[in-house]
Structures are given as structure tokens and as C-alpha cells.
Image (cartoon, rainbow, N blue to C red):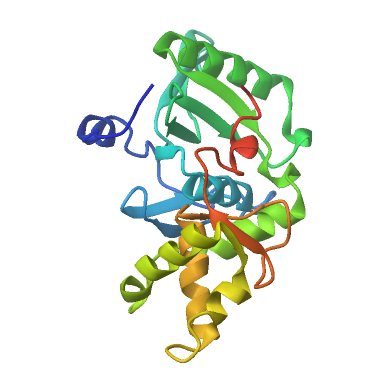
Amino acid sequence: MSWTNRSWEQEDTLYVPKRKVSNRGSQKRPHVIGAYYSPKMLREVEYESLGEYLFYSLLELDPQTVRYYVQPVEVPIPGTNTHGKPSFWPHVSDVLVFREHHVPHLFQVKESTTEVSNAKQIVDEYCKIYAFEKGWQYSVVYPKSIPVVVARNAKFLMGFLKPRKGFDALIPELISRLTFLHSSKIHELARGFQGNMHPLQVLPIIYHLIANCTFAIDINEELNQFSEVMIRSEQSVYTHYLTWGE
């Protein structure tokens, strides 16, 4: 399924966040809330936990992820009202992801497997049914279970998603050189511009090209100036961490 050349106007309307991010009710289990600017969504994206932030970081860094919507839908969960009569309450799922060549995928992000309870398992079952009826997939993911080095690399690269002043002038030359070389150590690629720019000025541009998926690295290895970088292939090294439930 191809999601390229799509306007997204309909989805932007349908999948606006269904509730506000807040710390309400977190006295017993405090959680971190925040927001970041998403180049893919062209707006701020809010998160309610470090696990959510980590997962959304992987979505930003994955070249196959075209679009994603946080808190996009309300799933009706059957229960009883205060009078003991059957009723429904709305459960807001965490994120709906559109990846190239995949059907839409609804994800529930959880901090750890200790969060699993009978009530939450029931919610997951109804979310799975809801997704199936929409022709989507549904998964529960635990981002904090991924390797520490992957999490560190993802958070580091998030700081280089937005281009800085002066990047445009050097980007075409960097792409041309790496295409010719096929692969290079990051510091060696940066040193190639010595005389025109200090290597330390070139490093942020290289990290930006990694973050926006133009260049590729092995995200399972610690990212630094001695890492090997290459022009990315069709597949993404982030893909494994986005398909746990498939």
C-alpha cells in the first residue's frame, strides 16, 4: 500500500488528538510529559511518557513511516454506568502509523510488561477488534525494552532533525561524495571539507542527513564521529523496532 503523493487533509481532520496531554492522575505514578516539533507532521507532537517519546522518535527516524497521529481514535469499551446499566467508555489509543507498503497500524505504547492486567488485556482485545474492523493492524509495544544503545542513538538524532542555517549549501556535496565513496567513517567524511569548513562544523550536517534518512548507520552500534555512514538503502535499520507486533 502506497501512501506517497497523498494530501492527508482527511486524516488530519479525522485523527486530531482526542484528549489533551496532562499529568492528571499521575500522583501515584508520575510520568514525563512534553512536546517536540515533528518534521514529518509539520507541527508539535505531544507525549505522555518517555516510552512514547522514544517510540515516536523511531517513527520520525524511520524512512518508511510517512505519517503518524497521536491519540487518534476513541475505542468504545463496554462497561456499566453508575446505575449498573450497560454502557461504553472511550479508550484513546496512543498512535496510528502510516508506513509505506503497510496497512495503517494502531499502537498502544506501554512502559513495561508489569502494566499488564486483566482490565488492560480486555482493552487491548477491543482495540484489536476495532483495528480489524477498520482494516488496520494493532500492536502493544514496550519501547523501553529496546537496547539502550538504540534508544540513545534515537534520542541523539532527534536533536538533528531540523536543518540549521547554512546546511543547504553543503548537503548536495556531502551526498555526492558519499555516493561516490559508498561508505565512510563520519569523521573522515567531515575532514574532506577541511580548508573550507572545520570538521566540527560539518558533523551536525552529517547527523542531520542521518536523522532525515538520507544517510544510514547501524543504529545497533553507538553513534559517534567514528561510526560508518552510507547512503541508505530501501530498508531501514529502524524497521525491526517498529514491527514487533506484525
Indicate left or right for 175 with 151 as reference.
Answer: left
Against 29, residue 199 (above or below) is below
Residue 8 point in image, percent of width and height = 25, 35
Asked which quadrant contains residue 140, the reply is top right
Observer able to see residue 70: no
Against 166, residue 116 (above or below) is above
Against 184, residue 240 (above or below) is above
130 and 234: which is toward the camera: 234
Indicate left or right for 25 with 119 as reference.
Answer: left
Residue 126 point in image, percent of width and height = 55, 14
Q: Seen from this angle, which residue lies furthest right?
A: 114
Q: Which quadrant does the N terminus fall into?
A: top left
Task: Please give the name of the residue rendered at 56% of the width and 81% of the height, measured from the top-left corner.
Answer: 191
Q: Which quadrant does the C terminus fall into?
A: top right
Residue 226 point in image, percent of width and height = 69, 71
162 and 140: which is toward the camera: 162
Indicate left or right for 244 with 7 as reference.
Answer: right
Residue 6 point in image, percent of width and height = 24, 33
Task: Please give the name of the residue rendered at 45% of the width and 88% of the height, measured from the top-left corner.
Answer: 197
Asked which quadrant contains residue 174, the reply is bottom left
Task: Please give the name of the residue rendered at 73% of the width and 34% of the height, measured from the top-left corner.
Answer: 115
Task: Please give the name of the residue rendered at 49% of the width and 79% of the height, measured from the top-left corner.
Answer: 202
